[in-house]
Amino acid sequence: MTQQTGLEALSTESRRFDPPTELAAAANVKAEAYERAAQDRLGFWAEQAGRLQWETPWDEVLDWQPPFAKWFVGGRLNVAVNCVDRHVDAGNGDRIALHWVGEPEDDTRDLTYTELKRQVCMTANALESLGVSAGDRVCIYLPMVPEAVISMLACARIGAAHTVVFGGFSSQALVDRITAAEAKVVITADGGYRRGAPSALKPAVDEALERCPSVTNVLVVKRTRQDVDWVEGRDLWWSDAVDSQPEEHEAQAFDAEQPLFLLYTSGSTGKPKGILHTSGGYLTQAAWTHWAVFDLKPETDVYWCTADVGWVTGHSYLTYGPLANGVTQVMYEGTPDAGGRDRWWSIIAKYGVTILYTAPTAIRTFMKWGEDLPAKHDMSSLRVLGSVGEPINPEAWMWYRRVIGGDRCPIVDTWWQTETGAIMVSPLPGVTSTKPGSAMGPLPGIAVDVVDGEGVSVGETGGGFLTLSEPWPSMLRGIWGDDERYKDTYWSRFEGQYFAGDGAKWDEDHVLWLLGRVDDVMNISGHRISTTEVESALVSHPKVAEAAVVGAADPTTGQAIVAFVTVKGDVTDDESGAEGFVTELRNHVAKEIGAIAKPRQIVLSPELPKTRSGKIMRRLLVDIAERRELGDVTTLADPTVVTQIDETMGKLASKS
Ligand code: WT7
């Protein structure tokens, strides 16, 4: 068995696809870019920044006071003007910016760049009339509707930073983020559509705002027309506040380092971190990577990124990158199975999508649903396929290439993080060869290293920790309000290098393989959730004494959350019994964090396996959760605990 796995891995590593010559000839980026960028990294990035429209040019490309960076020092630009106005000014106002596809069938809207500009201007005026000005923060809690993109751009236009909170997060998560960011205005909707039915959003905001004194107004998009509670003076319908505004808005240029957004993400400890991104460097790398990695031809491409705006992918590759490049894109509101399990493929056929950017978890779901569904649709328009969010297993990669890409589209597996702001590691279509399951290597202008536990580079081949050894334009500028945590989290483990939190290895061809997180961060369907966060949510339940949470391998979601919980007193004499209590606990986690953090399984146990010094043995819990043969348990204080937990887990696993 072991031997066979080894051989498979070997054959995968040695299997490679070389770019066809036609593709190489037409590619945006040529192979020389790597060499040139390596020789003059700052010059390379200055050239890419030059693709944007600056009101004032920069004096210095990089001011690096480790670990604090300023890019394009002294330069001034307006991010929204770069994403919208300049395309209209260039005569492309009639080009579709967004083909928006609602979840209910036939509920669609097309916005040209001219129309997008009009709406962004009106929204910017509306925000200003509510007292929002440069330097303020606005919280956006919306479903996948055009107003999400419009709101982000309106904030950018007036120099206010947005903090988008994923619609799947709970009211409590909203409180944490609004409070930390001291947001002045919240933009939300009455609700959104989820699997055919309207689901509410505003009640979570109402509940949150009882505890958020910084918020003066709430703008509410009418999406589902369901009844909502209303606070007079605080709440405003989007249609009332925005539609009456002047259609022109004079945009001012801001410093390259003007905060553009905060995005909260899970770390290995404590509360989510507010990752800060600024304007000039961020937009430079988001726009250039979007153009280079997808070999984008803005005049002819129809690009579709399936990520939600609540995650960084929705920021860099749905809003800022594609719009800075002036391309036409699809934005879809719903789930992959709304209106049929072939909904995505019918959207691709209808709009002639040429570039698709999605996550491995989605691909694995489609594999389960079968090849017949994509085969029913004409997807010959596709020419580049992207993957992001977690390592893509070679089987899913091959399926994506064959079934979705008709064996003709290059696949770009893109590694990056909320913190990196934009893609860092990826092949380039037409330039780089690809191996199924590998992100291949750093992009031009990006310096990565794989180091051992002491921070010493492993050299050309070998495994260890992924680090970034030089600053990059779209790097986070810090953690909002916490410079110490910024230094500790990313810059203290290895001297002078950014520690990404991922394991990685170079194979014998010096090709890079990402091996998953090495910290307590789980990756569930490409979403980042920390074990400690879920543990805190569990122990905040009055009946929970102790909780240990692990990420266990899952064939569809990559990892799944498994929780081991000890309770105070006896829950089996509750009316609903132990099973009812487990449901109650899962809902409790959903309330504290959001439905995405609900454990797949919760194992109730009288005790948790601990070493004699009292440390919970997580490795062992992972083995139990993944139903592996248990190794040496002799270091445990009480080995019988394990046997019992393992049995309970076995029963749960056989049920699901
Ligand atoms: C973590 C970052 C990047 C936007 C979405 C997730 C994992 C991401 C890949 C990939 C292997 C990947 C890493 C990383 N990850 N892309 N192509 N191959 N792993 O952003 O929530 O900040 O999570 O996602 O573990 O550290 P995020």
Image (tube, grey):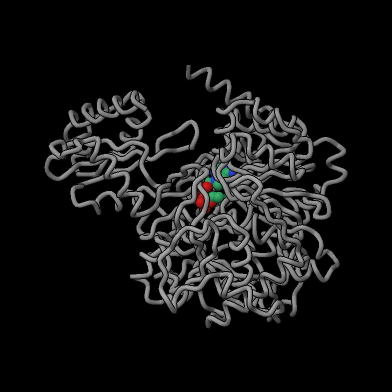
Q: Where 80 sits versus 400, above or below?
A: below
The residue that appears at 38% across and 64% down in the rendered structure is 176
Q: Judge by depth and name the residue closer to the eye, 400 or 172.
A: 172
The residue that appears at 72% across and 79% down in the rendered structure is 248
The number of numbered badges drawn on the structure is 0
Q: Is residue 555 left or right of residue 10?
A: left
Q: Where 124 sits versus 222, above or below?
A: below
Q: Give how far across and how far down residue 277 sits, in percent.
A: 56, 66
Q: Where 7 sits versus 114, above or below?
A: above
Q: Give how far across and how far down residue 329 sits, in percent.
A: 71, 53
The residue that appears at 64% across and 26% down in the rendered structure is 371
The image quadrant that residue 440 belongs to is top right
Q: Is residue 486 left or right of residue 447?
A: left
Q: Judge by depth and name the residue closer to the eye, 60 or 274.
A: 274
Q: Is residue 650 left or right of residue 457?
A: left
Quadrant of the snapshot with the C terminus: top left
Q: Give how far across and how far down residue 182 sits, in percent.
A: 43, 74
Q: Give how far across and how far down residue 204 sits, in percent.
A: 40, 60
Q: Judge by depth and name the residue closer to the eye, 14 or 426.
A: 426
The image quadrant that residue 111 belongs to is bottom right
Question: Residue 465, can we see it?
Answer: no
Q: Where 127 sits versus 201, above or below?
A: below
Question: Residue 420, can we see it?
Answer: yes
The residue that appears at 71% across and 41% down in the rendered structure is 348
